[in-house]
Amino acid sequence: MFARHRNPGWAARLRGFLTICLIAGLLAACGGGNDEGAQVEWIEGTPPPEYISQIQNGGQTQTPTTAPTPADGNAPDAEPTATTAPAEQIQPTATATASPPPADLVTGGLLTDEQLAEFQPNEIGAIPVLEYHVFTTDANKEAQFVRTIDDFKTDLQWLYDHGFYVVPLKEVIQDNIKAPAGKKPVVLTFDDSTAGQFRYLIGADGSVTIDPDSAVGVMEAFYAAHPDFGRGGFFAVLPPEYFCFSWQGEEREDDQNAYCGKKLSWLLDNGYEVGNHTLNHTDLLKVDDDEFRSEIAGAIEALQEYDSRIEANILAMPFGNYPDADTKQRQRKWLKEGFTWDGQDYLIIGCLMVGANPTESPVSTEFDSMWIARIQAFDKDADVDGDGIDYWFSVFEDDPGRLYTSDGDPNIVTVPKDLPGSLDGTLDTDKIAAEGKELVRY
């Protein structure tokens, strides 16, 4: 039923070394999107159809009998209980006090021969972009798109122990990675804005604190304890309050409804990114031109109503589906070159696939910001027929030389003269020159 999809550049370079594609056991749109035009059905880990209908029918649950129509971007009025009145001050957990990065991290300037030998930078290597959806504290609910909080903590610890450094997704897209010398950049992404990603604990007086057993709570505590690990996370948010960090699989957490705007502003204030996942989690495979533009632009407008600083110009493709390659070439062009909707111009600077491998370096000839590959965060305990985060972590351990390793200066590109066969010939020297960067081979 499900086809394998792979990132063409990465697969071509690693043929004979790695098994690339992750079989999306419950998801029809694996890694490379769906050029074949296969439709996908609802799966756990994405907004159920009844909630899409709920938004579009003024809060009344109704199973749709036709494809969803674009919403107007206005969430229905919520009626918070006495315990959900937004507090004036939102306090993070006690362990989430950010610390400055250590002064001994090497950032900026050409590396000495001794430093090159110590850090072994390789800025043509691959970059893991991890993909999370639903979080739970119940190990019995673990699945392809459901990660336990304990496993998430283990993921962060593994990354830290193996020299990774969390960077914003935008830095990768814009080739402006600011990881210290010797560190390997990693991007954390979170689709669908589920409650387990960012939950408030609400006091009887209406005060709120970040749930330490939500993904944001875990990250804040970990970043505070490990200031040499970087900071950030990309949240592909569904703007209506019924979706915005207030649903969890097939369950609702309506006490979270009133806090969407405060959470989004908090994310921006604390080094996280807010991205686009369309207005209604709409499959963009075969929608008409108006719905395509209204879903993407409508999500931007709706998110900016919460906080005008939100750009939402990086799009996580719902279900991994891109506009059909045979019939929707104009929409594909709009993704790369921008479009106009309701008198406004919109430009998407990057698109995220669903799976199934690391993405390429932004100075690779194989890199395309419209096709950013990701690694799905499941392991063997999820009982999924495919290669998830545990497989890729073992690959990185066995062959760290194929990963992007920073030289500490985003204006200098440092690459070994001797490269693995999978990377040989992929350095985009024209791009490096066009960006005015200095190329160092050693």
Image: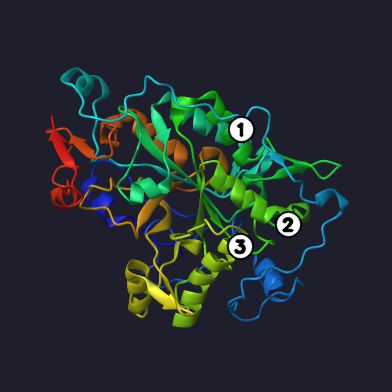
Three-letter code, disc 1: Asp
Res 101 visible: yes
What whole-number distance in Å separates the C-alpha atoms at marks 3 and 2? 11 Å
Instruction: Tell me the tag on residue 150.
Output: 1
Mark 3 / mark 2, whichever is N-terminal: 3
Q: Dot 3, crowdedness within 10 Å: few (<14), some or many (≥20)?
A: many
Q: Hey, which quadrant is residue 352 in on the image?
A: bottom left
Which residue, given by chain and number where applicable, does mark 3 sit on? 239
Q: Could you tell me residue 57's position as x and y percent?
A: 72, 76
Q: How is the image coloured?
A: rainbow
Instruction: Tell me the tag on residue 257.
Output: 2
* For discs 3 and 1, the disc positioned in front in the rendered view: 3
**Left-right relation of 439 to 223:** left
Three-letter code, disc 2: Asn
Q: Residue at x 44, y 81 (%)?
A: 289
Mark 3 / mark 1, whichever is N-terminal: 1
Q: Hey, which quadrant is residue 178 in on the image?
A: top left
